[in-house]
Image: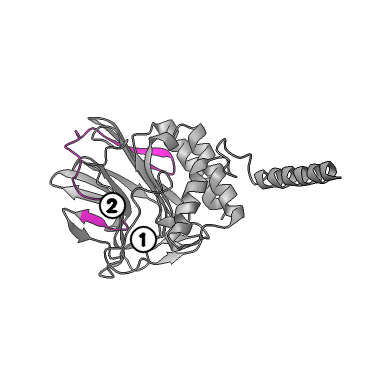
């Protein structure tokens, strides 16, 4: 009788464990998702007292990370911040690549977050922006002077005046910045470890857009919209700024610089690290846009 009871308990445990793993195929470490980073990210979010995304959405996020790994992109990243999710504002403040590093902080007022949409960049003098606490000069990650990439995913391009900063840091002639500027037509301005810029005319619309820059050499820099190569620049890299990168604003030599357009696009995702090829940028767009379209 004891043996029968033992077998029943063993069978019940086996079935429960199998059902638990059906959330995803599971990782070798026992994480219920295919990627251990998802479990580590959720744990950090909850340890911080915040709410992780819903279980269904975590499955989509897991698929996104799997695709980025398959395309060889994930291993190049130093940070990945996901603001467009249904968990909490705090979930977007945790770096998915390494949840214990480069958590976002708010030096000024509380940043405005909208579930499944993202965060609002700095507007005029509202003092709302994030400090990534990532200093590209000293971080020692994949991002370096002649091997660097920066991407922001934004909710629209309906900017009719002024400027909106999405990310950046400046020291002397060492520029990292990504912004949309509308003197009359709308333009993307992108800099990466140089004061030489690429300028691209952008169509105003209500679509999601991915803005990217990738430096693959000392004199080789390209900027992209929605995964397509839009502009090249041969300006030599001059150095890496020794200031933390801000999100939603610009760290201008330790001073805050922000946009002034009253209804800026939301920032859905921000990530950076080592350089990406044009093919990898295209793959990045496909993967991020698939996730955003599914929200």
Q: Is residue 264 above or below residue 41?
A: below
For the point 72% across and 46% down, the residue is 13
Give residue 26's position: percent from left, percent from top. 61, 40
The quadrant of the rendering that contains the N terminus is: top right
Q: Which residue is mark 2?
A: 133
| Residue stretch rendered in magenta on the structure | 224-251
Alpha-carbon distance for marks 1 and 2?
Answer: 28 Å
Left or right side of 269 for 10: right
State how many labels appear: 2
On whether residue 37 falls in the magenta region, the answer is: no
Residue 240 point in image, percent of width and height: 20, 40
Residue 227 visible in the shown view: yes
Residue in view at x 63 percent, y 43 percent? 24
**Mark 2 crowd level (few <14, some 14–19, many ≥20, 10 Å Cα):** some
Spot occupied by residue 186 in the image (x, y as percentages of width and height)? 33, 54
Q: Quadrant of residue 261?
A: bottom left
Q: How many C-alpha atoms fall within 10 Å of the one at disc 1: few (<14), some, or many (≥20)?
A: many
Q: Is residue 290 above or below residue 266?
A: above
Tell whether 272 sits left or right of 1.
Answer: left
- Quickly name the residue at label 1: 159
């Amino acid at each position: 009788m004891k043996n029968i009871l033992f077998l029943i308990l063993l069978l019940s445990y086996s079935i429960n464990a199998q059902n638990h793993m059906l959330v995803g195929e599971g990782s070798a470490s026992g994480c219920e998702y295919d990627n251990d980073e998802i479990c580590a990210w959720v744990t950090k979010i909850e340890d911080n007292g915040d709410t992780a995304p819903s279980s269904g959405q975590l499955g989509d996020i897991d698929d996104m990370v799997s695709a980025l790994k398959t395309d060889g992109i994930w291993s190049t990243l130093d940070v990945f911040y996901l603001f467009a999710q249904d968990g909490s504002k705090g979930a977007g403040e945790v770096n998915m690549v390494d949840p214990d590093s480069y958590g976002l902080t708010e030096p000024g007022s509380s940043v405005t977050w909208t579930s499944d949409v993202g965060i609002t960049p700095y507007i005029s003098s509202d003092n709302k922006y994030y400090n990534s606490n990532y200093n590209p000069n000293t971080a020692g990650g994949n991002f370096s002077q002649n091997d660097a990439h920066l991407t922001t995913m934004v909710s629209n391009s309906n900017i009719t005046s002024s400027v909106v900063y999405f990310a950046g840091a400046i020291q002397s002639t060492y520029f990292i910045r990504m912004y949309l500027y509308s003197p009359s037509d709308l333009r993307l301005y992108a800099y990466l470890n140089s004061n030489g810029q690429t300028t691209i005319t952008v169509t105003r619309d209500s679509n999601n857009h991915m803005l990217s820059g990738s430096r693959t050499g000392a004199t080789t820099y390209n900027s992209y919209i929605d995964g397509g190569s839009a502009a090249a620049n041969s300006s030599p890299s001059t150095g890496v700024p020794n200031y933390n990168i801000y999100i939603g604003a610009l760290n201008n030599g330790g001073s805050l610089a922000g946009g002034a357009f009253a209804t800026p696009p939301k920032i859905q995702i921000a990530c950076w690290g080592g350089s990406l090829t044009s093919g990898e940028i295209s793959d990045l767009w496909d993967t991020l846009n698939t996730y955003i379209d599914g929200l």
